[in-house]
Amino acid sequence: MAENLNQLCITLFGVFVIGGLCNFCRIYLTSTTGHRITQSLRKQLYAAILRQEVAMFDKCSTGEFVGRLSGDTQLVSHALTSNISDGLRSAFMSISGISMMFYASPKLAILGLVIVVPVAGLAIVCGRFLKKISKNIQDNLATLNTIAEERISNIRTVKAFSKEIREANNYNSQLDNVLKACYKESLCRGTFFGLTGFLGNMIMLSVLYCGGAMVSDASLTIGSLSAFLMYATYVGISLNGLSSFYGELNKALGANTRLVELIEKESAIPISGGKILEKQLSGDIEFQNVSFVYPTRENTWILKNFSLKIPKCTVIAIVGSSGSGKSTIASLLLRFYDPTLGSILLDNHDLKSLNPAWVKSQISIVPQEPILFSGTIRDNILYGVEDSTKYNIDEVATSAYVLEFTKSMPDGLDTVVGERGITLSGGQRQRVAIARALIKDPKVLILDEATSALDAESEHYIQEALEKAVQGRTVLTIAHRLSTIKNADKIVVLKQGQVTEIGTYKELMNLKDSYFNKLIQHQTFT
């Protein structure tokens, strides 16, 4: 007896060890697989986001993209790993239990499975509804992320206007929308599991009643009935697991719909492909009857039949009142957007036929409000170049007067600038942006009032540096102040998206009652 007991314990110990190892392998494999799936989804999604044209970012908020990258990918990953693992285990248990039910009593097994059919139908209906609700929840969460991201990133504005309470209320209001959607999901899940539980109990009641009748007429033994009920309970637990699996799967399908529509979306403006000119770019630019509307404002024409020839190595200043289309011209030249009508030529080649990456390697822009990344000053200056060892950063940092303020910093060019360069002043950020534009030695330089954030002394030095930098380049200046247009080779005056006047500063000033003179008098080229 003792020998048999020892053998049994040793056998059970071995079984438990194997079971523990199998459980470890299951958890480890599903967990690591989940992480890999999440990583793969995020790689694909992030690459897809970066591939999209600028118009896509005009329509969708940053918070929505971040929500898809974080929440949606995690939800899909969980459904494809842990959830599927639990679902497969429940399916195996269900098949095994049903087989044993047929072995114990085929008649009772058929009776029990007849009631499973409406449960399956209920699962399909609730699953479709749950998928729709899940997508709605993810959309609401994306809006919630947008509100939080915008307000936190602009916290100084919120603080300046003392709107903390209002912003908290706005966030809470959106949270209420999320909660309402979650209530619908809870109602759907509660209804589904309540009805499946009820139907499961009805199965047990029917089996118990029919089984009792079969025992009373001796067509079934009490032992067989007891075994059947045990197997039925086993199957019931497994079917409950399958129900949870199906519900979670439909939630993931709702999130997956949001991911797939973005991953599979083709960009209207590719990031690569097209011709690369064999000859060195000279910098001739021509706008031919260009008309343009922003995709988000399709009824408002920003440019109308805009035509302009910019010879190589010339400085052209674009002036006009606010909303006249000045900055839009720069955006079209950088191919952030394609013209709605007309074409843009670069060295007599249609911009659409050229490789976008190559075109942007030939063009640099200094925006009016430069955005820096949260690295070092050196990283930001070298952002636009591939091999930093080929470029003399000290030379451009000196010409843009970056070294003037970094020499007093302990880490110099390796000083961390913070999120969006927040630790630097506006003038310092502008100088870093100028250095970033000049370091890749572009053939075309776009200056969106590059000295607007500088003090008078720095502006004087930067103007001298830019005068040297523009030599041998085609320069397009988006002018907002009088001081930046006097030395331009030509000044183009825009009014409501059309060229009204063109000439040198002296020529335009000599025109009586000209639109340019009105702009000068009111200083309204903003």
Image (cartoon, rainbow, N blue to C red):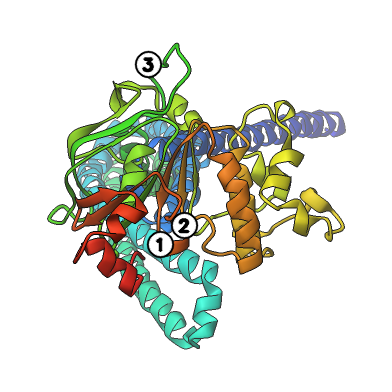
Specify the label residue 484 is tagged with.
Answer: 2
- Residue extending farthest to the top is 278
Specify the label residue 480 is tagged with.
Answer: 1
Mark 2 / mark 3, whichever is N-terminal? 3
Q: In the depicted view, which residue is nearer to us: 406 or 272?
A: 406
Callout 2 amino acid = Thr
Q: Are marks 1 and 2 in contact (CB under 8 Å)?
A: yes
The quarter of the image holding the N terminus is top right
- Residue extending farthest to the front is 510
Mark 1 / mark 3, whichever is N-terminal? 3
Callout 1 amino acid = His
Q: Is residue 266 visible?
A: no
Q: Which residue is mark 3?
A: 275
Q: 375 left or right of 518?
A: right
Q: Is residue 444 visible?
A: yes
- The residue depicted at 70 percent of the width and 57 percent of the height is 417
